[in-house]
Structure formats: C-alpha cells, structure tokens
Image: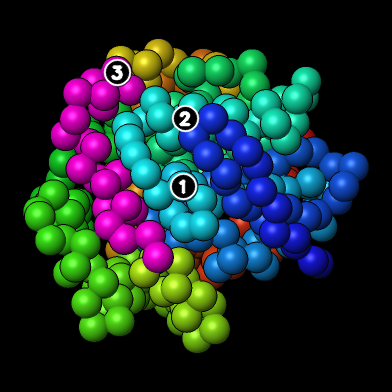
C-alpha cells in the first residue's frame, strides 16, 4: 500500500505527513514518539489502511521537515494536532493513535477537545498522571535519559558517533526488534536535521506549561480509549495500578506479549488488528 508525502499549512508552519490507506475509510491520525518519525511505521500504517482507515501520520513539531522551532509545551503540541484535524478532517471526528510522546499528546487532545476525537488508542504510554504516580525504582532506572536531556550539550551527546545513543535506546527499549538498515538510515537523517529539538520535549516537563497540562488531565477522559503496552517494554513499564477513575467512557488496557516499546513496528499486523477489533 502506497503512502504519499503531503504538507499542511498550519499556524506554526508547514507540517509534513504521510497519507494513504482507504480514501473512503475512517479518518485516523497517527502520532509518532521519540526518537522516531512516520516512515518507520509504514507497515503499521498500511495495516490500518487495510482495515478501512484513511491514515495521516505527521512529523511532529521538532522533527524535520516539520517545524523544529518551539515552544514544546503540551498546549502547543496539542494545538498542532487540533489544527491538523481542522485542515484534514473538517466536520468529522477522527480516530487518534499515539505512540510514546504521541501517546502523551493523545491524552491531552482527548481532554482538550473530546468532540474532535471519535476514539483513541495509546501505545506504550500510560495516562500521564498514572505514570507520575508510580515512581518505582525499576522505572526510574529506565528513565535515566530524561535527566540527561536536561543538560546543556545533550543534543551533541545524542548526535555523537552517528547517533549511537539513539540506536542504544532503540535496542534497550525493544530488545526483540532489529530495525531495517534503510529505515534506520532514514531515521538518522531526520534526527540529525532536527537535533536538539526532539530533546526539548523533555525539557518542557520542568516548565510551567506542564502544570496546565496536569490540571487538564485531572479530568476524566470522555473519549473511548484503548491502551496497548508491550510486555517487554524497556522504556516504560506496564502500569500496575488501577486507574479506571481517569476514564469516563469505554476503556481497556491490554499488555501485548513478546513485544517491546515500539510494539506497532515489531508486530504491525497484530497491533492493527487489536485496534480494529476493539469496540467495534
């Protein structure tokens, strides 16, 4: 299944995206995470298309060729997504799928403008307030990179030795995944053109704007939402607390065996099938 490279002129600039799938299908917006971009997920996007989705997957703010200028607070990132929905699917609510940071944005979009989202799926990211409420030692060990990215010069560290740190994170976070060399080279090109902007998402965690996001996220989510998490995730542990009070609509959490953090890249057909089957 072919995907075309398209652009959307939004308030923050010209955003690039992959677009394809069933032209008459359910509009589905897919948000990538860190350190990633849409092309690595092409097989997953194609599987969504085969299941009756019209798909668009943008390069998020901070990832070239989309704008790399900030700010990178949650309100700004959510604003980009809502502006894209207005341009791409005016008058019809969308299915929103977000991985990692794209998942964090998905939760915020759902509480900010629930009428724009038909249903949502998050991959490898618990509800942000749930994530913050369970600071287990094992999770703190996995989150060491967040502290590193606060330091001046961390962009140089992340880019050094042909992005060796980035490759290490991929191996650590999805131990069973071996990314195709051509896809890895394409991702490296994007990240080299983007640094240090992708790291500024993490610096935004300590800025005042995050308090506003936490207040918004204290409201129960009124959008049907499916959470999928890889059992072998080396970045974020599957949650071990009951947080059903954070969801006011239909909700499910599934821990998927034999996949890690990049579960939709490791098992595109299986993850797309779980998404298509849920709530239908």
Residue plotted at (40% across, 49% down): 68
For residue 210, which quarter of the picture?
A: top left
User: At which x and y percent is residue 115?
Assistant: 64, 16
Compared across the picture, whether 94 is left or right of 122 comes to right
Q: What element carries label 3?
A: helix
Compared across the picture, whether 237 is left or right of 90 comes to left
Q: Which of marks 3 and 1 is in front?
A: 1
Q: Can residue 265 be seen in this view?
A: yes
Residues at marks 1 and 2, CA–CA distance in whole angstroms = 15 Å
User: At which x and y percent is residue 149?
Assistant: 17, 54
- Badge number at residue 78: 2
Q: Can residue 179 be seen in this view?
A: no
Provide the residue span drawn in magenta. Answer: 193-214
Up-down: is 232 above or below 127? Answer: below
- Whichever of callouts 1 and 2 sits on the residue coming sooner in the sequence is 1
- Whichever of callouts 3 and 1 sits on the residue coming sooner in the sequence is 1
- Badge number at residue 241: none
- Whichever of callouts 3 and 2 sits on the residue coming sooner in the sequence is 2
Disc 3 marks which residue?
Answer: 212
How would you rate the neighbour count of disc 1 (Cα within 10 Å): few for under 14, some for 14-19, many for 20 or more? some
Describe the colour scheme in one phrase.
Answer: rainbow
User: At which x and y percent is residue 152?
Assistant: 10, 55
Residue plotted at (55% across, 68% down): 40
Up-down: is 34 above or below 216? Answer: below
Disc 1 marks which residue?
Answer: 67
Quarter of the rendering occupied by the N terminus: bottom right
User: At which x and y percent is residue 69?
Assistant: 37, 44
Q: Is mark 2 on a helix, strand or loop?
A: helix
Residues at marks 3 and 1, CA–CA distance in whole angstroms = 23 Å
Q: Nearer the viewer, mark 1 or mark 2?
A: 1
Frontmost residue, 63 versus 228: 63
Quarter of the rendering occupied by the C terminus: top right
């Amino acid at each position: 299944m072919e995907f075309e490279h398209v652009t959307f002129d939004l308030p923050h600039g010209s955003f690039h995206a992959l677009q394809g799938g069933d032209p008459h299908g359910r509009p589905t917006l897919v948000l990538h995470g860190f350190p990633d971009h849409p092309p690595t997920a092409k097989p997953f996007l194609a599987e969504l298309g085969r299941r009756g989705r019209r798909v668009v997957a943008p390069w998020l703010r901070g990832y070239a060729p989309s704008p790399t200028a900030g700010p990178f607070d949650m309100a700004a990132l959510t604003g980009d997504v809502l502006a894209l929905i207005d341009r791409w699917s005016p008058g019809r609510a969308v299915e929103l799928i977000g991985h990692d940071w794209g998942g964090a944005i998905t939760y915020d979009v759902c509480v900010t403008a629930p009428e724009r989202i038909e249903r949502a799926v998050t991959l490898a990211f618990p509800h942000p307030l749930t994530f913050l409420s369970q600071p287990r030692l094992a999770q703190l060990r996995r989150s060491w990179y967040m502290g590193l990215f606060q330091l001046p010069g961390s962009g140089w560290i992340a880019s050094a030795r042909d992005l060796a740190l980035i490759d290490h994170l991929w191996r650590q976070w999805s131990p069973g995944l071996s990314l195709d060399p051509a896809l890895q080279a394409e991702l490296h090109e994007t990240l080299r053109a983007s640094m240090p902007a992708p790291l500024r998402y993490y610096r935004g965690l300590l800025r005042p704007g995050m308090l506003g996001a936490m207040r918004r996220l204290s409201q129960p989510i009124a959008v049907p939402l499916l959470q999928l998490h890889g059992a072998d995730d080396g970045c974020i542990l599957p949650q071990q607390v009951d947080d059903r009070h954070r969801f006011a609509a239909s909700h499910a959490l599934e821990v998927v065996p034999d996949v890690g953090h990049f579960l939709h890249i490791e098992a595109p057909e299986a993850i797309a099938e779980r998404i298509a089957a849920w709530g239908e």
